[in-house]
Amino acid sequence: MTTRTAFGAATEVAAPTHPAPLPRLVRRLAGEGISWVVVAAGIAVLVAWPIGRLLYEAVRTPGVFHQIWADPEILRAIRGTVVTSLGATAMALLVGGGAAIAFWRLRVAGQQWLTAGLLLPVLVPPFVSALSVTQAYTAAGLLDHLLGIRADWLFGPAGTTLVLGVQQVPIAFLVLAAAIRTRGGADAERAARAAGANPLTCLFTITLPLLRPALLAASALCFIAAASDFGVPAVLAIPARYPTVTTEIYRAMSFSSSGLASPVALSTLLIVVALVVFAVAGRLTNRITATGRHSSPLVVRGRPWHGVVSVVLAGYLLVANVIPFLGLLSVALTRVYGESPVPAHWGLDHLREAVSGAAGGALARSALLSLAAASVLCVAGVLAGSVALRRGGRIVSTLIAIPYAVPGSAVAVAILLAFGRWFYGGLVIIELAYLARFWALAQQPIGAALSHIGPDPMRAARACGASAWRAWWTAIWPSIRPSVFAGWLLVFLTCLHELTVSSLLYVPGKETIGVVVLNAELAGDLAATSAIALVLTLVVLACAVPLFLSRRLRGALGFSAGGMW
């Protein structure tokens, strides 16, 4: 008898003693095919049709790809994206990967707080991080007023690379921390140390070779995440006239009269590159998780120089997180932009404006869109998680992940091509883009929880006389409830500060809060921009409080980093 998944069994009705002689396929559709039908319809509407339409438009348009290589500005954008993404990847591996290895090998003081600080960029919108850096380190920024230090070179490729690197540090840290748990080679290192090898020899001859697949996977993920980002280049690259692919798509759709030919070509290029990179990363990740086994931390006795690691990481967090936040706060509180941020110049005028008028309405729209997307996608995540466990269900998870794996700019163009005729000009088209792009965020933790339960609790409840839905509610739901809430929270927070998709699909009067911040920054109203960005950041952090308080939620999302937080 074919083993049925937990949720699939919940859709069944108790079989009669003498079942009707229906064909096997009909019986399967009547019993467990409901979730298949719903998931297949969702994939067709949100994934297959938009992405297929985009690829079709790219193929049918004559000379569309020749236009890419013939346009010097597009070639500059491609080069700019490659340069900044490679630099950001190198920085993420150095900081995030180095911290993961250090936490496994050394006795680092304040490890839990340092881990929380390294993961903090996951919760802070990228464009807010970039804006905070400008308010802290450039002209009329916090350090310029206090110490006379200014770094106007942050506008351009260097600053874009550094801030993108800060945003990718959590990815490198989590991938390497998970791999170290299973492939760290603690026993091999202990044997080598017992044979007389020094710590550096063990690191370069045992640990790093074992972590090579994880390093390659983390590099691929960080590269494509940096190349897909729009918020950071919008703040730091556009003012310096340093083009990237995402800003070129935004410019072509917002200010060009040549139609969608260039955005379609660039979006197709991003999709192809992203799918290739993620296919490689997926194979490497499967090797990490399939062949590894749990390895205990290789923590040696505390040495005086171990404190240097804590100081270096704390200094990095001070420069990358704390000082930029203080810079954003000082500009938001100072009544007149450019004045010294002393208490005599403080006021709440900008903050009051940030929660009223256009910004207040945009925040309400973002909250409504995020609430709807998170709620719908959690239900879809349960359905997709149950389907993914059945025969042939692996392709379901792969298809759902495509819109999240490819850049948001490409998803926005695909949604516009597929649904613009009916929904452009309203919030529905933005909601459709959110549903397509972030379905994978909800499905991943829920699917992982369902895969660990198995069918036995459901069978036991049915054997005791419970109905199908009663059995699911009592035997399955309590086990997956933390993962469902974690997925809901992750989707809600991500949609709340989303910018890339919204900036390409909104119309005047339908702005989201991220678009309001971007427009205010491009208009040069830095005081209002900082106030709105500060309010958005505080709202996101307040909504993320359950993640800081609940270890189960962090574990469901993979933020526990191998038990280090």
Image: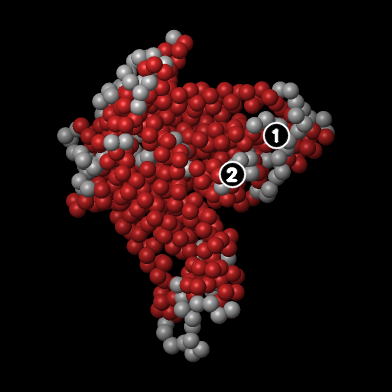
Say which residue label 1 marks: 105
Left or right, residue 274 beside residue 77? right
Q: For the view shown, which residue lies furthest in the left direction? A: 257
Q: Quadrant of residue 79?
A: top left
Q: Is residue 556 above or below residue 184?
A: below
Residue 417 image point, x, y percent = 24, 48
Quarter of the figure that contains the N terminus: bottom right
Asked whether the viewer can see residue 138, the reply is: no
The quarter of the image holding the C terminus is top right
Q: Residue furthest right?
A: 195
Q: Secondary structure at mark 1?
A: helix
Residue 486 percent location from the top left of the image: 49, 51
Would you call the spot at circle 1 few (<14 residues within 10 Å), some (14-19), or many (20 or more)?
some
Quickly name the residue at label 2: 560
Residue at left offset 68%, top offset 40%: 184
Amino acid type of disc 2?
Ser
300 on left or right of 157 = right
Tell me the crowding category of disc 2: few under 14, some 14 to 19, or many 20 or more residues within 10 angstroms, Cα based: many
Residue at 52%, 45% (x, y): give it.
547
Dot 2 or dot 1: first in sequence order is 1
Report whether 355 appears left or right of 445: left
Q: Nearer the viewer, residue 466 or 349?
A: 349
> Colour scheme of this structure image?
secondary structure
Tell me the amino acid under the disc marked 1.
Answer: Arg
Q: Is residue 482 visible in the rendered structure shown here?
A: yes
Q: Could you tell me residue 415's position as x and y percent?
A: 28, 48
Residue sitting nearer the eye, 561 or 40? 561
